[in-house]
Amino acid sequence: MDWNLQAIWRFVVEITILTVGFYYAFIFMRGTRGWPIVIGFGVMLGIFLLTALLNLQVLIFLLRNFFAVSAVAVLVIFQPELRRLLGELGNL
């Protein structure tokens, strides 16, 4: 793979931004009623990665569809936390 300096720089910046974003999102969520749900989604993601490594096609199909449906569910479940987050961002 031909990595030039610009590609490496973009990769490092992108990973850094994502890492900081996830860190602050987890810090924001910790201690709220939604924290156990975050842990549950993390466990489901771990199970999905394990099934992908073991090449279990039926479970991969079911978990992929679960995550597709859960995208809408996340907005409903975390509505109070998202409202609080947007309020705090507005006060900055």
Image (spheres, helix red, strand yellow):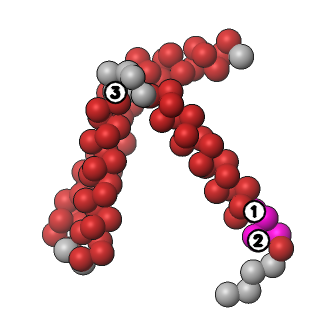
Identify residue for label 1: 10
Task: Read off the magenta span.
Answer: 6-10
What numbered label is drawn on residue 34?
A: 3
Which image quarter holds the C terminus? top right
Identify residue for label 2: 7
Helix, strand or loop at disc 3? loop
Counting the numbered discs, the total is 3
Q: Which class describes the residues within 10 Å of circle 1: few (<14), some (14-19), or many (20+)?
A: few
Q: Which class describes the residues within 10 Å of circle 2: few (<14), some (14-19), or many (20+)?
A: few
As drawn, the residue found furthest toward the bottom would be 1
Amino acid beneath label 2? Ala
Give the main secondary structure of the magenta stretch.
helix
Given contact means CB atoms under 8 Å apart, are the residues at marks 1 and 3 in contact? no
The residue at 27%/42% (across/down) is 40
Amino acid beneath label 1? Arg
As drawn, the residue found furthest toward the right would be 5
Given contact means CB atoms under 8 Å apart, are the residues at marks 2 and 1 in contact? yes
Which image quarter holds the N terminus? bottom right
Q: Can residue 70 be spotted in the picture?
A: no
**Magenta span contains residue 81:** no
